[in-house]
Amino acid sequence: MEKVIAESAQGTALALEKNNSNTRKLYIESYGCQMNFSDSEIVASILSKEGFNTTDILEDADLVLVNTCSIREKAETTVRKRLEKFNSIKKSRPHMKVGVLGCMAERLKSKFLEEEKIVDMVVGPDAYKDLPNLIQEVDEGRNAVNVILSKEETYGDVAPVRLNSNGVTAFVSITRGCDNMCTFCVVPFTRGRERSRDPQSIVDEVNDLWGKGFKEVTLLGQNVDSYLWYGGGLKKDFTNASDIQKATSVDFSKLLGLVATAQPKMRFRFSTSNPQDMTLDVIHTMAKFENICNYVHLPVQSGSNRILKEMNRLHSREEYFELIDSVKKIIPDCAISQDMITGFPTETEEDHKDTLSLMEYVKYDYGFMFAYSERPGTAAARKLEDDVPFDIKKRRLAEIIALQRVHCQERTEQHLGQIQEVLIEGTSKKNEGHWMGRNSQNTVAVFPKENYKVGDFVNVKMEDCTSATLIGKAVGYSENN
């Protein structure tokens, strides 16, 4: 599926190498954002110490967990269909238990456990360390629930199990939660307040990954630019920190420098940024270190100042343009991608045209675009009528996607004729004789295999392209090997 479109929830069943001392089988499916996939690795690590091996065969599982997303209605619908599937299998495997993790767990705990009775266990994103106790409750015939949001939990002391790993790329979580309170978003209610992880634990995890052969790390958070470490606690408490704590604090720009310096031959990416929180210090740090990729995912959601205000996005269209201009001035070849919501309540045709004109100004490399779906519990659901008809949402979304496809083609063509470093991640899905990897700008590139292998950094001359994929020929190893 092209990056230009993200109008579906994607689920992945995750499998872990067998531990012969474990006897019970765990099956995990993850939906939604990269944080959910990272959280599933934490869950697998915790449960591996409780006697569970993971399996990719659903029918063999003793415990089935689905890590859920509440960002859009379609994701919730997909999860509900999967729960129906799990319960049909339970009829022939009565000892099998089903649990819901993540954002839907927090939001729909009563419905799942008491009204619909379709799960045995409900566990929120901050309660995974309580899984051993909850499983014991379930084993003893009682439903189990823990969805309490933490002000401190970061799972910084849990070594994630790398599930379905290609052995080359990995996620490292640096923050949890979000304080921004966008009116369309459930994350502050399902994942709680922002809190940052000890930078030394992040560096240690990066070093461990390098020692295991990984070549690229993506630093994850709902809002990475809000990362701030001064010895612990919520970001709002920073005003009470001592002068020494403030002087020695680590923000996101400094953290990027720490990991880039710790492993100078490892590539680093990060996601997700918020325009109102990203500082130019971050962009200057990216420019300073060659091993920080020239790519920023910078969601804007709308091109209309009026709609941005309704969304409680604390930046204007003009401020966003100023940030975009600064990024392109400091890193001229930086790729930029977007999230866009069309059909937000009260959106007019003029607002929609503002979004299209913003896209024309930026010309994103790719994007993730959605029609608005009301999320219960959010400020938009409480205060605004979902008054844009579905057919208008659908038409506006189609126009946004069509324009993004044009820009994808333009941006991808700009790489032609260049020799660029590509990290080989695996075999191309369309051609067994080609490798697939990504360049610094996060654009997928394919090229003939020859004598290279997965994990190699290879210089590739880009000769042709589709709107989303570069096609080239390797000209030798890069200096990173």
Image (cartoon, rainbow, N blue to C red):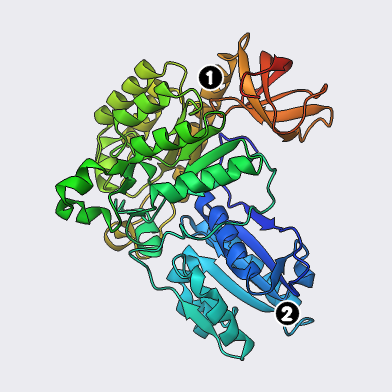
| Image coords of residue 242 (percent x, y) | 16, 51
Q: Secondary structure at mark 2?
A: helix
Residue 302 can be seen in this image: no
Residue for point 49% across, 22% down:
290
Q: Amino acid at mark 1?
A: Arg
Residue 480 tag number: none
Q: Quadrant of residue 53?
A: bottom right
| Image coords of residue 368 (percent x, y) | 50, 39
Residue 473 can be seen in this image: yes
Q: Is residue 197 left or right of residue 169?
A: left
Q: Secondary structure at mark 1?
A: helix
Residue for point 30% across, 25% down:
321
Q: Which residue is mark 2?
A: 90
Q: Which residue is mark 1?
A: 411
Q: Amino acid at mark 2?
A: Lys
| Image coords of residue 217 (percent x, y) | 55, 39
